[in-house]
Image (tube, rainbow, N blue to C red):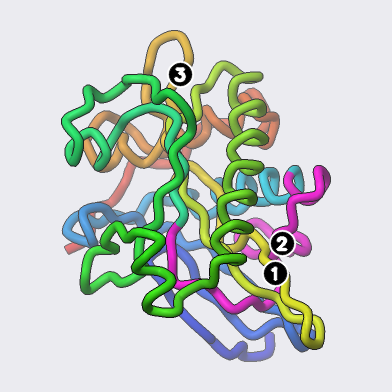
Amino acid sequence: MARRTKVYEGKAKILYEGPEPGTYVQYFKDDTSAGDGAKKALIEGKGVLNNRLSEFFMNGLNEIGVPTHFIRRLNMREQLIRAVEIIPLEVVVRNIAAGSISKRLGIEEGTPLPRPIVEFYYKNDALHDPIVSEEHILAFGWATHQDLDDMVALALRVNDFLSGVMMGVGIKLVDFKIEIGRIYDGDFQRLVVADEISPDSCRLWDAKTGQKLDKDVFRRDLGNLSEAYTEVARRLGVMPSNATPMVKPRLMN
């Protein structure tokens, strides 16, 4: 097998040069972390689950006309994606109060929000991805007014799609984060959904019991993360109904 050129390695994924110009191969790792890397573990099979789930969501978005960087899945852990210029912002959409918004504003976790709230966070691990306003974004040139309008519109369309899909299988979409990238065609620019959409980047609660089916299971020591992700995949038809969860996590130093 030919040696591949690594372009970037993050906490949960590796990017390699793709087989064609303007493409990358995105590899999903089993590494899991929380608290800015303070807590880490290897959860065997998590990368496989997230690859399949992200493929499912990205394909669904492409089919309804929401552009993404996703081209196709290559194997159990890898997918072919378009090379994009990532805007250095995480776009978070919240439907129900949980996590940092509950801590910041004193809103009881589980409180439905009056409407979806879109927040922006500056992508910088050293600064712990601080929340930023549109004024910050414009002042520092991270995005333009038009970019912001397009990003909010994309995020809300993703929210409509994910909320409907999840509610159809008895899951509440509490919140999620996405990254957005620029693709250029000559002088023409368009924005696309990039990175991944998976239980790593969403808060998902069982609609009846409130059971958490996302990364909070790991953050808060609520059980087996692999079982939670496998349950999401089962309900969505991404994994066979008789699929067994992967092995328990192995903590990393």
Residue 28 at what x, y percent from top left? 53, 62
Viewer-closest of 78 and 150: 150
- Mark 3 or mark 1, earlier in chain: 1
Q: Which residue is mark 1?
A: 81
Residue in front for this viewpoint, 217 or 41 = 217
Q: Amino acid at mark 2?
A: Phe
- Image position, residue 212 (x, y; %): 37, 26
Decide whether residue 87 is among the magenta residues: yes
Using the image, determine if residue 137 lies above or below residue 213: below
Q: Mark 2 or mark 3: name the one nearer the start of the chain.
A: 2
Residue at 33 percent across and 29 percent down: it is: 97
Query: Which of these two is toward me, 85 or 146?
Result: 146
Instruction: Please name the residue shown 59% across and 42% down the image.
Output: 156
Give the residue type that dot 3 points to: Asp
Q: Is residue 204 visible?
A: yes
Q: Quadrant of the N terminus?
A: bottom right
Residue at the spot of label 2: 70
Circle number at residue 153: none
Above-or-below relation of 185 to 106:
below
- Asked if the stretch drawn in magenta spans residue 15, the answer is no
Q: Which residues are magenta?
A: 61-90
Indicate the secondary structure of the residue bearing disc 3. Answer: strand
Dot 1: within a 10 Å radius of its alpha carbon, few (fewer than 14), some, or many (20 or more) residues?
A: many
202 versus 188 height, above or below: above
Q: Which residue is mark 3?
A: 206
| Residue at the spot 60% in from the left edge and 26% down from the top edge | 166
**Vertical arrangement, residue 167 with respect to residue 44, above or below:** above
> Disc 3 versus disc 1: distance between alpha carbons?
31 Å
Marks 1 and 2 in Cβ contact (< 8 Å) = yes
Q: CA distance from mark 2 to mark 3?
A: 28 Å
221 lies left or right of 45 = left
**Residue 150 coordinates in the image, percent (x, y):** 63, 58
